[in-house]
Image (cartoon, grey):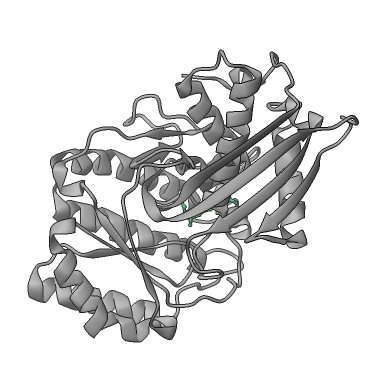
Amino acid sequence: MFVENDFVCADFKIIPTFTVSCKAPSNIALVKYWGKFEPQLPANPSLSFTLNNCHTATQIQFKQKENTSDFSFDFLFEGKPKESFKPKLVSFFKRIEKYCPYLKNYHLVIDSKNTFPHSSGIASSASAMAAMSRAIMELEKQLNPTITEDFLFEKASFLARLGSGSACRSLKGEVVVWGKNKSVKNSSDLYGVPFGEMHSVFNNYQDTILLVDKGEKQVSSTVGHQLMENHPFAKERFAQAHENIEKLKTVLQNGDLDEFIAIVESEALTLHAMMMTSSPYFILMKPNTLEIINAIWAFRAETKTPLCFTLDAGANVHLLYPTNVKETVIQFVKTKLVAYCQNGQYICDELGTGSALL
Ligand code: DP6
């Protein structure tokens, strides 16, 4: 297990140029991270499925520069300069400066693209920050070849966390836990750790994402997290997340899908209940989100198919189900649920193994 100081890179030898391409996926939390404190530490532990198809691919060219007093970079999104993303990157670089002092020796040309549709309402900050952090750690390995593979992944997750909390769960697969808790050995507030062996029913577990509303969220996650600070139910919620991690740990090992469904759907609705009971209160679900939830419940009661839903901080619905009922579920999506999706759009994804070099 690493502590914060281990991530301060003190020993490195600058090389003139280096180019790396890597990808990192999005992830969907089953136990939700909602509430944080400085420096981007979680108020409660969370657990997520790493996705496979929805990912960000990032290439970074590092070119040595003379002046090392500040950061210097160009950012291209899908081949075109994107100025609006720059302030977020500047604050990310400042946050990681202490841990990656070598970055100021380089001008970075960052070229990033997503596999999922642009502004689909799927948060791309997790995959983007994870891909960027992995690329930076590939540079660090060149500057200090003594670092181990474990260290590379854990520091990449640590850096990604400083960019966006949930991003720290996108470096590895297939299930990642972030946040110190007594149920998962080696769990840490500083970075995500892989959950480990699971029951075979979770092999290739499916996530079909129904795109209900692709518009900008009225309330960002950052603001939502802040609203947990004086939230009347915060203490109980944080305690519940610890309990749900413990219960889910058992379920992921014994494959009890009824219990899995109960925990996952309760977590999704609790997340939105926190939004509806904060001050100021807000609602991110849309009428069609509720239509879908009701349709899932009716379908499950009728067919006994172990299909459940989860939500992130938005109106889209993630359908989670084992791979052996894929055909039945896709049929249900096509005949019933697609009517509730914006422009009939949905994305088929499944459990994945995390970031990789390209
Ligand atoms: C509802 O990781 O997007 O998706 O740390 O401020 O960048 P920041 O927030 P972010 O929050 C994600 C919230 C969530 C739940 C989750 O992914 O655990």
Q: Indicate the position of residue 152 as horizontal and vertical percent values.
A: 52, 26
In which quarter of the view is residue 267 placed? bottom left
23 sits left or right of 297 in the view: right
Callout count: 0
145 sits left or right of 335 in the view: right
Q: Does residue 30 appear anywhere in the picture?
A: no
Q: Does residue 107 appear anywhere in the picture?
A: yes
In the image, residue 278 above or below residue 132: below
In depth, the one of 108 and 7 nearer the eye is 108
Q: Write the residue at 65% across / 59% down.
A: 77
- Residue situated furthest left in the rendering: 303
260 sits left or right of 159 in the view: left
In depth, the one of 22 and 99 nearer the eye is 22
Q: Write the residue at 47% across / 64% down.
A: 116
In which quarter of the view is residue 311 placed? bottom left
323 sits left or right of 217 in the view: left
Q: Write the residue at 18% across / 57% down.
A: 323
In the image, residue 65 above or below residue 57: above
Q: Indicate the position of residue 233 as horizontal and vertical percent values.
A: 47, 55
Q: Indicate the position of residue 32 as horizontal and vertical percent values.
A: 42, 51
Q: Write the residue at 61% across / 42% down.
A: 37
In the image, residue 137 above or below residue 34: above
Q: Indicate the position of residue 222 as horizontal and vertical percent values.
A: 62, 56
